[in-house]
Amino acid sequence: MEAERQEEIGRKLDGFLADGERFVAECHDARVDVQPIEDTKLRPLSDEDPELYGHLAAVSEILSDAGSNFVLFPMMTVAIVCLIIQMKWIDTIGGIDIEEVRSFWVYGIALGVCFFLSGHVALWVEGLAYRRYRDELVRHIRDAGFTRWHLLARISQDEDLSNIADKLKTDWREWSESGFDR
């Protein structure tokens, strides 16, 4: 809200409110509703701005899909290779005796390293996907009248938007006072 608009509303309410009183005023269809702030709750973003929420949910799902594919496939591949080695199928098929690596410790280390590396690749791929949609997201968020900080406060506890919230939290590009770059 513009500072001038806030000052105008403040002048109109000057002398009317008792010290410490806080209300929420909302105007719909030329009708003003006033409630004590304790009785109000923010509506979920999905109710307040379904278009923005839908866009955020779609991009969040794209980020989730982009990263998860890079963890599952390598992990399954390493697990299958470990199984082939353990079952001595590689000895039969390739004629290679690799008795030294038939150990659950080796398999555990291989799976752990694969998980660690594929997790980092997944985060990198999610970052690429986020960068692809970032400008469009910023435009939709601005059009809805939100700042970066207000939007993060609204979506930080929403599990469906957790991927996009994480990316917005860690986007270290230049930000303006409104929360987005100029």
Image (tube, helix red, strand yellow):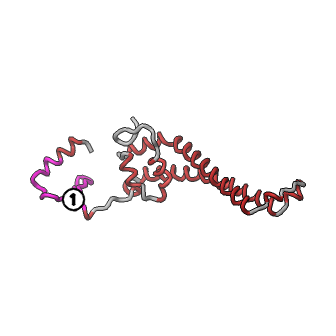
Closest to the observer, 62 or 172? 172
Pinpoint residue 120: horizontal percent, then vertical percent.
Answer: 60, 49
Pinpoint residue 43: horizontal percent, then vertical percent.
Answer: 35, 59
Q: Is residue 107 above or below residue 135?
A: below
Magenta part of the chain: 9-37
Q: Which residue lies furthest to the front in this view?
A: 100
Quick check: 86 left or right of 119?
right
- The residue singled out by tag 1 in the image is 34
Q: Which residue is drawn at 39% across and 50% down?
A: 151
Q: Quadrant of residue 172?
A: top left
Quick check: 29 left or right of 19?
right
Total marks in image: 1
Pinpoint residue 106: horizontal percent, then vertical percent.
Answer: 73, 58
Q: In which quarter of the image is the C terminus?
A: top left
Closest to the observer, 140 or 116? 116
Q: Residue at x 44, y 58 (%)?
A: 158
The local crowd at label 1, few if under 14, some if 14 to 19, many if 20 or more residues have their Cα within 10 Å, is few
Pinpoint residue 98: horizontal percent, then vertical percent.
Answer: 83, 56
Closest to the observer, 66 or 47? 66
- Is residue 18 visible to the viewer in this orientation of the structure? yes
Q: Residue at x 40, y 51 (%)?
A: 152
Q: Is residue 16 magenta?
A: yes
Tell me the kind of residue under disc 1.
Answer: Val
Q: Which residue is drawn at 70% across and 57% down?
A: 76
